[in-house]
Image (spheres, rainbow, N blue to C red):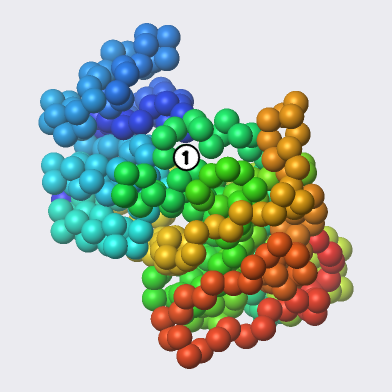
Amino acid sequence: MSAPLSTPLPVVLAGARGHGRWHVENIRRLQKKGILRLAGVCELTPLTEEELGDLGTPEQSADFGALLDSTGARIAVICTPIPTHTDLALTAAERGVHLLLEKPPAPSYAEFRRMADGVAAAGVVCQIGFQSLGSHALPAIRELIDQGAIGRLVGLGGAGAWVRDEDYFRRAPWAGKRRLNGVDVIDGALTNPLAHAVATALALGGSTRAEDVTGIETELLRANAIESDDTSCVRITTAQGHPVTVAATLCAEEADEPYVLVHGSTGRITFWYKQDRVLLQRAGHGPQESDHGRTDLLENLVAHLTTGADLLVPPDETGAFMKVVEAIRTAPDPAPLPDAAWHRIPDENRRVVPGIDGLVAAAADTLSLYSELGAPWAPGPSWRNSAASRRPARPLAARREGPGGSAT
């Protein structure tokens, strides 16, 4: 990287509605701190004066490249539909503009590599928007593991039981799609809304790079009338020897905070990653709970460019997550749940899978797939392995090596 830059850095935001509204407010916060200046907004329909508020009068255009050129942007925040990520990232990289790229970074591993390699060749910096990886709880948990607080690391589980109404899958043309107009989208519970559970579990196990993944099993299902999965689980075999199982649903009976469970031979650590909250349970001690701060990823990118601070989430540190996306992309299309396995709540306009909340928790608790937990509608796993002859070790199943029960 060249000489450090000076603040405030001009930034262009691509995608300022939907989830992009969060970025608008974050840029507003950082502009007030004097480290960023919103120079441009790339949207099909310009933001109104009311939406911009005290952000001033940034230039607005639907032409991302032209906007980068005319504003002299040094940073671009890309929060656009998943299939557009790679091309927009490369458009910025070709102009020497550094990036915060929303997760998932790409809809396929090939597109991810095209993006990451192009960004590296251009010599620009790219931060991938897994906000949970900015939590100060991660180094704290890693220190507990290294100190042997929970004995030998056995495996990691992730659980996400969320509620989404049917309109959620109609909020954009790509929502709920695996492909759109012949182009990969790979929207789904594990790849988009609950992607943080996958990425965070991999990070806590030290398995973040593509080469850290040796095998993947998926069970992809759907209760809603969509293409993608809304109820799914995945088990990842890692080179580090720690299986990672993540279960997710958007059809929960009741919404719950998602979490990652770190299983040890003499204890466990529960991390509610949206809350930055940690619970340590171990033999011979009472439970210990702690709250942690978080470093904002855009602020970290600015610090990296201006002071040389370490970048928290460079592309290659999400390679393992992208291997999971690829396994989901190449798996058979999600199986529709039988009519008897779900019901609709008309007043809430949503579909519910009875018992799924407990299954999600049990999967994280035992590192098992839905089919291994006896879910009658689970078809059994689709298997992807870089060394196809090597099957993973059986999960912990009912054998619990640490104290305590389900974290929910």
Viewer-side residue, 105 vs 371: 371
Q: Position of residue 199 (x, y in %)?
A: 51, 59
* Residue 79 x %, y %: 37, 37
Task: Specify whether residue 33 is in view.
Answer: no
At 76% from the left and 69% from the top, the residue drawn is 373
On the picture, is 25 further left or further right than 242?
Answer: left
Circle 1: residue type: Ala
Which residue is labeled 1 in the image?
A: 175
Give the x, y percent position of residue 364: 70, 64
- Which residue is more in the foreground, 314 or 288? 314
Q: Residue 204, located in which quarter of the rendered image?
A: bottom right
Say above or below: 143 vs 225: below
Residue at 39%, 70% (x, y): give it: 210
Compare residues 272 and 37 and report the one nearer the observer: 272
Tally the numbered discs: 1
Q: Residues within 10 Å of mark 1 (few under 14, many from 20)?
A: many
Identify the residue shown where x is 26% and y is 38%.
75
